[in-house]
Amino acid sequence: MWSPVEAVQPHAFLSLWIITLETDERIPIIESMKNGWRVYEPYPFDSIDGQQLARIFGAAHKGEYVLGDIITIKERERQYSGKIMHIVSSRKAPTNHKCAARGKQAISGTASTGNVTVQYLVDCGDGFPHIAHQSQIIQ
């Protein structure tokens, strides 16, 4: 499965994607232009380089959980546990919730102002960190 990643710009690449293999290994792939051709190649991710995530996602923010916390998240009916490596804010609200009935207000995760939500980058030991919204954290 290919999943796009929202990275801050500018970068030497056009886009960043995470490929999740059947073995659940997560491989970062970049799309770039070389000699007029679109090229897709592995992105050299270094989990020890704490500044690499800041270069990709922007400055760290504060969330309900803090760097180093061990959390469990739910993605596509699967659960993953890992350590929070980076916290970013996103202008996009998560879209994986069901629509509320008319006249009802849906509450998912923590409240946000202006559709700004917190995203946690969680190292689950399977390659590139998982990007989880507050509403995906189950423990």
Image: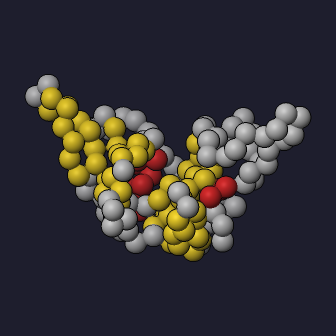
Residue 1 higher or lower than 82, as above or below: above
| Number of callouts | 0
Q: Residue at x 63, y 50 (%)?
A: 118
Residue 107 place in picture, x, y as percent: 79, 48
Nearest to the observer: residue 6 or residue 61: 6
Nearest to the observer: residue 91 or residue 20: 20
Nearest to the observer: residue 118 or residue 103: 103
Task: Let me know if residue 63 appears in the view.
Answer: yes
Residue 77 place in picture, x, y as percent: 55, 61
Q: Residue at x 34, y 43 (%)?
A: 16
> For residue 109, which quarter of the picture?
bottom right
Nearest to the observer: residue 2 or residue 128: 2
Q: Residue furthest top?
A: 36
**Which colour style is shown?**
secondary structure
Residue 56 place in picture, x, y as percent: 40, 47
* Left or right: 117 as drawn, with respect to 5: right
Residue 115 place in picture, x, y as percent: 69, 37
Task: Let me know if residue 62 appears in the view.
Answer: no
Residue 44 higher or lower than 105, as above or below: below
Q: Residue at x 58, y 65 (%)?
A: 73
Residue 79 higher or lower than 10, as above or below: below
* Left or right: 77 as drawn, with respect to 29: right
Q: Residue furthest left?
A: 35
Q: Residue at x 10, y 28 (%)?
A: 35
| Quadrant in which the C terminus appears | bottom right
